[in-house]
Amino acid sequence: MVRTPLTPEERERGCRLGALLRQARGGHSMGEIAARAGISVETLRKIETGRAPTPAFFTVAALASALGLSLDEVVTGCAVSELPAA
């Protein structure tokens, strides 16, 4: 099975997700948050750095829960701010 390449928008959204998670993690270690979410530290590192820009829904949901974020906050934090048409 061949995976289709990610669009620039998907990559950008992945970077915004990573930044949101890093900010929400605050002073907590990657190990602590990864353990709470039930994922590996390497998976969290890849998501935070944008190297895994499209993580599975349940991974995002577990991270949101571990960080005390609602899924609405995650969606809002990853949304592209649209500029009005000129």
Image (tube, rainbow, N blue to C red):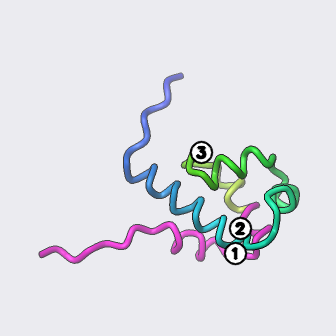
How packed mark 3 is, by other alpha carbons closer than 10 Å (few <14, some 14-19, many 20 or more), is some
How packed mark 2 is, by other alpha carbons closer than 10 Å (few <14, some 14-19, many 20 or more), is many
**From mark 3 to mark 2, how far is it between C-alphas?**
16 Å
Q: Where is residue 41 in the image (x, y as percent from the top left)?
A: 79, 49
Of 53 and 49, which appears nearest the observer? 49
> Which residue has dot 3 on it?
52
Labelled disc at residue 64: 2
Labelled disc at residue 69: 1
Mark nearer the N terminus (2 vs 1): 2
Type of amino acid under label 1: Leu
**From mark 3 to mark 1, how far is it between C-alphas?**
20 Å
Q: Quadrant of the N terminus?
A: top right
Type of amino acid under label 3: Ala
**From mark 2 to mark 1, how far is it between C-alphas?**
5 Å
For the residue labelled by badge 3, is the local secondary structure a helix, a strand or a loop? loop
Query: Is 12 on the left-hand or right-hand side of 28?
Result: left
Q: What stretch is highlighted in magenta?
A: 62-86
Type of amino acid under label 2: Ala
CB under 8 Å between discs 2 and 1: yes
Task: Establish if 32 lies above or below 75.
Answer: above
For the residue labelled by badge 1, is the local secondary structure a helix, a strand or a loop? loop
Please tell me in which quadrant of the rendered image residue 27 appears: bottom right
Q: Position of residue 42 (x, y in %)?
A: 75, 44
Q: Where is residue 20 in the image (x, y as percent from the top left)?
A: 60, 68
